Image: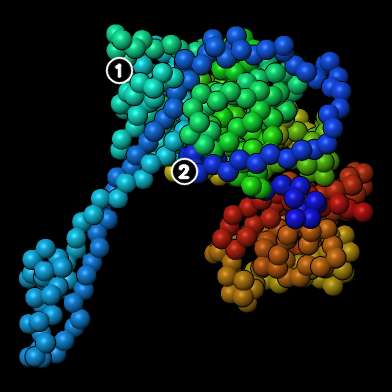
Amino acid sequence: MHPVEAARPGPFTRLRPAAAAILLGVSVLGSALPVPAFAKGPASLADLSEQVTDAVVNISASTTVEARSTRTMPQLPPGTPFEDLFEEFFNKRNGGRGGSGGNEEAPRARKSNSLGSGFIIDASGIVVTNNHVIGDANDIQVILHDGTKLKAEIVGKDSKIDLAVLRVKPTADHPLKAVPFGDSDKMRPGDWVIAIGNPFGLGGSVSAGIVSARGRNIESGPYDNYIQTDAAINKGNSGGPLFNMDGEVIGINTAILSPTGGSVGIGFAVPSNTSKPVIDQLREYGEVRRGWLGVRIQNVDDTTAEALGLKGGARGALVAGVDEKGPAKAAGIDVGDVIVKFNGTPVKASSDLPRIVASTPVGQKVDVVVVRKGDEVTKPVTLGRLEDTEKPQQANLKQPDTESTVRQALGLSLSGVTDELRKRYNIKDGQKGVVVTRVDPNSNAADKRIQPGEMIVEVGQEAVSTPADVTKRIDALKKDGRKSVLLLVANASGDVRFVALGLD
């Protein structure tokens, strides 16, 4: 393989159950080079490993489903000489059953197994693992470090954070040992960690490394906030703990980035501070009850921040839509507001907001700070509950000189709404704005994926209904010294998004 190709990053993958076969390889990379003292790490991790290993378990999950195979007798014309012969043959194949014209379904049990990891957080028998380790299993066993097998029941599971809580019954002969959670927010890139789990079915495996990064978003879900580590984690490590040097769980190993399916030193763990509230709710309710604000948001880049006059540069979450029945609507939060603080916590990027809101108790009253037309406004909001189905989701007044100005400024040709355009672009009835009829392929608007048939609803947070309105607003923004303009763009169905375009 070409060396560049070999180094190309592969997809993010969940740490799938351990494979049945293991392929081991050894390569010599040349003569050993002296290692700087600071790179050697702790003298030994044996004491730490011995301290926590008994609390780490293997998870064996079996799923048995009934598969039905259908044997169909050939359809023969009535009265054919072979009709009786075929019917007798197919009835014997199907266990002597008849009466359905030769079509019989024979039930068969099909069993699939998976192996993963987990850890005990309560000596009464509470075990934590990944949701994808157990899936829809109907037989789950927790295997202790000494080989003891305990049957487990599901307390609750959450697919969005990929966590599951199990319960086992300890025996007098086999008391359980639990490990505590640590504060994942205190971990810094460079801090030492160890991972213990069941990679490729090799239970009790210990690997060491450091925290490579924090706050990783690998786009696996709405609340991504992973710890990245170079401690070797592989298939079968799913659900296993990532420990700090005090023997506290600061992460739950969940995913890897690998072109081969094996460890390449880029693994991801759910931080303990993200998982603890979810685990507590699963233990208490058997489900997760997340807070709900009722807004659709998008990120704020530098161009958008300049267009909004947002002091302090790009930050916060731009509100692109408000649910009519949501808490934000009742509190007076509007489209175009930028949420910069939620319940005292700064919102640095739009990806922060869903995670912060979801971790806030349902029914709690919080202060939401928004920037509206350059001014900070505080809106008290009483949070609702996020349901599982919710997603963290005229006349032609065109004038030649007006269109020319807009085309030069934004790379767009515009028109007022007409019956012909509404029909051509299948524009939703009642949708107001200015229709985009052409986009210069070399323009910034094309780069931002504005399409003919979409409608400009607002320019610089002011409503427009004609191309002349657009030109007037652009001229005003230029006089104010603005270098970019924020457009509110609607598609044919009425869904809106904000697009920031330069005015150079």
Q: Position of residue 463 (x, y in %)?
A: 70, 52
Q: Are marks 2 and 1 in contact (CB under 8 Å)?
A: no
- The first of marks 2 and 1 along the sequence is 2
The residue that label 1 is drawn on is 169
Tell me which amino acid carries mark 2. Ala
Q: Position of residue 461 (x, y in %)?
A: 73, 46
Q: Is residue 461 above or below residue 343?
A: below
Q: Is residue 500 left or right of residue 388?
A: right
- For image coordinates 68% across by 61% down, the residue present is 455
Q: Is residue 296 above or below residue 440?
A: above
Q: Is residue 89 left or right of residue 120?
A: left
Q: Position of residue 484 (x, y in %)?
A: 85, 48
Q: Is residue 96 above or below residue 19?
A: below
| Nearest the eye: 141 or 402 | 141
Q: Is residue 406 left or right of residue 94?
A: right
Few, some or many C-alpha atoms within 10 Å of disc 1 (few <14, some 14-19, many ≥20)?
some
Tell me which amino acid carries mark 1. Lys
Few, some or many C-alpha atoms within 10 Å of disc 2 (few <14, some 14-19, many ≥20)?
few
Q: Secondary structure at mark 2?
A: loop
The residue that label 2 is drawn on is 20
The mark closer to the camera, 2 or 1, is 2
Quarter of the image for the N terminus: give it.
bottom right
- For image coordinates 84% across by 22% down, the residue present is 35
- For image coordinates 76% across by 47% down, the residue present is 7
Residue 348 visible in the current orientation: yes
Residue 185: numbered disc: none
